[in-house]
Amino acid sequence: MMNYNISSFMPPFIEGRAWISEDNYKLTTFDMGVILSLFFIAQILFAPFISVLKNTLGTKNTIMFGFTLLSIATFTLGAIARLDNPHPFFWIAISARFVQGTGDITVFITLYNLIL
């Protein structure tokens, strides 16, 4: 199931599913690009605020918070590959990738501060 974490965003997977909703909405490769890019947008947006979070929660708690976000987002991305409607797939994937990017940058910036 966890291999769906990324494979569900690849064009062969999307084309193979042939998702078309009642209103003829179909996921495109542009939609997949938007979903994948939100990971990096979240990192750019939240990177300046990680030090405030680290000072508030402490180093260990910030790392655990980041890993929790990563775990929830990764499980969600693996689970949504089983959806049959492209609308909820798109919106849940956008949210989960954003949360995944936030958790990723939280862990990595905090770990670099811990090492240095």
Image: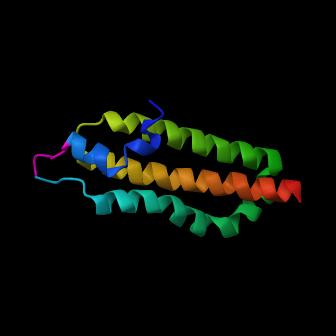
Q: Quadrant of residue 108?
A: bottom right
Q: What residue is rendered at 19% in x and 53% in y?
A: 26
Q: Residue furthest top?
A: 1
* Residue 5 can be seen, yes or no: yes
Instruction: Report the quarter where the N terminus lies.
Output: top left
Queried whether the magenta region covers residue 20, the answer comes back as yes
User: What's drawn in magenta, residue-wise?
Assistant: 18-23
In the figure, 42 relative to 111: above or below? below
**Relative to the observer, which residue lies in front, 1 or 73?**
1
**How far from the left and from the top, in percent, is residue 61?**
77, 45
Residue depicted at 87% across the width and 55% down the height:
115
**How was the colour assigned to the protein in this rendering?**
rainbow
Magenta stretch: includes residue 103: no
20 or 69: which is nearer to us? Answer: 20
Q: Residue at x 63, y 52 (%)?
A: 104
Q: Name which residue lies at 62% across and 51% down.
A: 103
Query: Does 29 sit left or right of 45 as displayed?
Result: left
Is there any visible trace of residue 88 in the rendered image?
Answer: no
Q: Quadrant of the C terminus?
A: bottom right
Residue 41 as seen in the image, left or right of residue 112: left
20 left or right of 74? Answer: left
Percent of width and height locating residue 99: 53, 52
Query: Where in the figure is residue 80, as x and y percent of width and height?
Result: 37, 38
- Classify 87 as above or below 68: below
Most prominent secondary structure in the magenta stretch? loop
Q: Residue furthest right?
A: 116
Total labels drawn? 0
